[in-house]
Amino acid sequence: MELFHNQVTREQGVFSYRFNHHSFGLYLMAENVEASTTVLDFPSLSEFRREVRKGYDYIGISFIVPNAAKAGKMAEVVREESPSTKIILGGHGVSIQGIENLIPHDFICRGEGVGFLRRLLGETVDRPVRHPMLHSSFNRRVMGVPLPKMSGVLLPGVGCPNKCRFCCTSHFFGDYIPYLSTGKEMFDVCRGYEEKLGITDFGVLDENFLKSPERALELLDCIENEGKLYTFGIFSSAETLLALGNLDILVRLGVQFIWIGVESKREAYEKNRGVDFHDLIRELRERGISVMASSILFLEHHDKKSIWEDIDFAVSLRPDYLQFMQLGPMPGTALHDSYLKKGKLRSDIPYEEWHGQDKIWFRHPSFNGEESRELLKKAFMRDYEYAGASLLRAIDTMLRGYRYALGHSDPRVRRRAESFTLVKQMRHFLPAARLLSSNRATGELAKQLASRYRALFGPRSAGDYMVSAAVTGFAVAEWARIRYMSDVRHPGKNLRRYRWSKSDEDLSVCMTPALAPEA
Ligand code: B12
Ligand code: SF4
């Protein structure tokens, strides 16, 4: 249940970020029905079994394609322990063809869940949506150092209208379904987080947040009028970034992390037409915006030579984080249907393996499964060896952004220097980084950053030396744990009850005017 360690920094050893993430959709749905509800996130099978024995009217199981077997086992447990309970299946896993015959169930929700549940339970569909308050990640460690939970998640909407051929979410939701339609609504949720939990940094879980520029600009107005320094991590396609005209708008908005789909050097997708990614990524990083770039491997046109052209292209962009994903014909997408028709899908690979970080599950003219696994690993290694640890690249970006803001002539950009709240603390990672660097690029970057810190903030104090020593202690222990034990981390069970009793804590903000009845 990790993003970075599974799909991004996976070959970076002790430098790999270790964060877990909640199953956000579950909390959103629980918040938005009237019935008493329990969310049980990451239970073990026995914990799940115990909860099922309470005899619920309905149990919803959320799963994605690679988790279909687990969902099947859970449904069997429900039938065994509480035969009168109705089972509802939801999430991307329900796109699997023939799911009706694979997993015991009573109802299937295909697409948006809040409207579906309200309808099923006989509630009013078009009443306001309450936004849950959740940390965007928890159980956070960087180089073994435990970090506090600092960011909240915002769920402005699901789906995307671009409908790229391979993309699950855009196909699953049909179109874009907003939960927070205006910038003011988003701002109010941010303020709610700040008031209730002291959170001012947000992960925006929206496939293409800037696709609605009016909403983003209204949010910017609210932030500047109220003098807030909220910061955001967003997903965006390159076209929507360029449509902004001036990237300083992002700095003023407080964007500090952007995930962009570069996909392939060839302009394989409309959203990337005419984009100079080298330029775009350099300009973003210069402004203190860390970039996560995604590249797809094993596209149709890839052969043993051209795939390396794409890998080297992606690496040469020097983003802070680089994700390589294998092309994945996922059920429900146009890509899947076309591969199915052409007989390209392999029937011998179970759904557990359909996740894009091990072996491809279709017949590629130039690569078999084993080769795809090896090549993916090499691609990640190439990036790590060329540009060094992502942690250090992100520190580099932070320092650049801090200086960019400080030296800017526009006071609205200048005030954003204060948003780089971690800039001084990150210095403490550098001695550990130098000690544990396992390639030249990482060692060099750590050295360079140390001298830039000296130039910007002066020499380290005695207190700084002590903190750095503690960080190094954590890092060495983590290095030893990975090397001699295991690097597996499983998030513990999280149980939250809604409307069971008056004392249940209300952690939500009532926001949007209404969910469209047809959603
Ligand atoms: C956050 C996230 C994660 C988190 C997961 C946190 C967690 N605890 O689940 C992390 C980073 C750990 C992660 C990991 C992975 N992920 Co992921 N992830 C996402 C992401 C970006 C957002 C999901 C989200 O919260 N959306 C917001 C909520 C509100 O939407 P939702 O979850 O879809 O829920 C709505 C509906 O689907 C429906 N619904 C969902 N469940 C249920 C249940 C019931 C009963 C009902 C009625 C309705 C319902 O109602 C909800 C409200 O409308 C999506 C992409 C996206 N933008 O959707 C990919 C996505 C879900 N991930 C995906 C994949 C492939 C993975 C990985 C396998 C990647 C990898 N190789 O490592 C791993 C698997 C981890 C695991 N073991 O399960 C794919 C799934 C593809 C598929 N068709 O199955 C997606 C769609 C990305 C993509 N475009 O390919 N992921
Ligand atoms: S732009 Fe991104 S989210 Fe939208 S359809 Fe394409 S891949 Fe999916």
Image: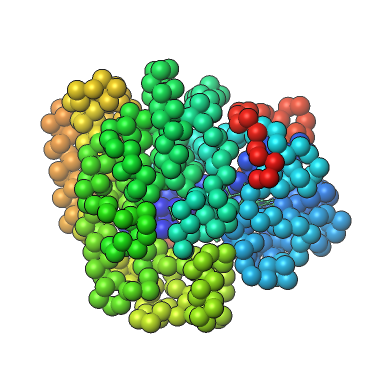
In this orientation, which residue lies closer to the viewer: 513 or 30? 513
For residue 96, which quarter of the picture?
bottom right
Query: Which of the two residues, 34 or 450, is positioned nearer the viewer here?
Result: 34
| 181 sits left or right of 420 in the view | right
Quadrant of the image containing the C terminus: top right
Q: Is residue 266 found left or right of 518 in the rendered image?
A: left
Q: In the image, what residue occupies the spot 72% across and 67% down? A: 100
Extreme residue in the top direction: 226
- Residue 372: quarter of image: bottom left
In the displayed orientation, state which residue is furthest to the right: 84
**Residue 122 location (% of width, % of height):** 81, 42
Residue 478 in view here: no
Image location (x, y in percent) of residue 453: 18, 34
Q: Nearer the viewer, residue 434 or 353?
A: 353
Determine the quadrant in which ligand 2 lies.
Answer: bottom left
Residue drawn where x is 26% and y is 70% of the image: 308
Residue 368 place in picture, x, y as percent: 40, 81
